[in-house]
Amino acid sequence: MYSQSYEQCIQVCLECMEACNVCFDACLNEENVKMMADCIRMDRECADICAFAAMSMQSNSPFARQICSLCAEICEACGNECKKHDYEHCQKCAEGCFNCAEECRKMAS
């Protein structure tokens, strides 16, 4: 069983992963997909690291803090990319990314 201290961060990572996956899928359906390429790429990267961070915390990995630190960095970058776009799915994703970055920084410290 993972540490209780990880619970909040795991939840926020999973919420961010979901927001990134929703954004990724919605971006693929936008009229100008090419313009959304960086957003799509960041959504994939961010969803993957959020899933990995959650798994590392759930398994009490000795590297959980370092993984959370990297997750915070990637979430911040994804949030910054998503907030450039006016689409609702991008704005929701940016919010989720910034929340996750904050929680992961707390976990990493």
Image: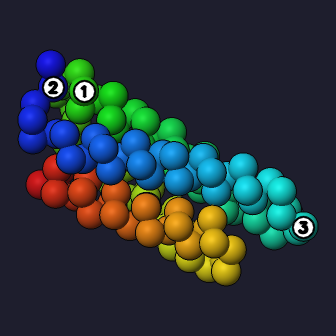
Q: Amino acid type of disc 3?
A: Glu
The quadrant of the image that shows the N terminus is top left
| Distance between mark 1 and mark 2 Cα atoms | 5 Å
Q: Amino acid type of disc 1?
A: Gln
Q: Vertically, is 29 above or below 88?
A: above
Disc assigned to residue 2: 2
Residue at the spot of label 1 = 58
SS under mark 2: loop
SS under mark 1: helix
SS under mark 3: loop
Circle 1/circle 2 CB separation < 8 Å = yes
In x, y percent, where is residue 35?
Answer: 81, 69
Residue at the spot of label 3 = 31
Crowding at dot 1, Cα within 10 Å, few <14 / some 14-19 / many 20+, comes out as some
The residue depicted at 28 percent of the width and 41 percent of the height is: 10
The residue depicted at 90 percent of the width and 67 percent of the height is: 31
Q: Amino acid type of disc 2?
A: Tyr
In x, y percent, where is residue 79?
Answer: 49, 67
Q: Is residue 71 visible?
A: yes
| Distance between mark 3 and mark 2 Cα atoms | 43 Å
Mark 1 or mark 3: name the one nearer the start of the chain.
3
Q: Nearer the viewer, residue 72 or 58?
A: 58
Crowding at dot 3, Cα within 10 Å, few <14 / some 14-19 / many 20+, comes out as few
| Residue 11 location, quadrant | top left
Horizontal side of residue 88 vs 25, given as left or right:
left
| Distance between mark 1 and mark 3 Cα atoms | 39 Å
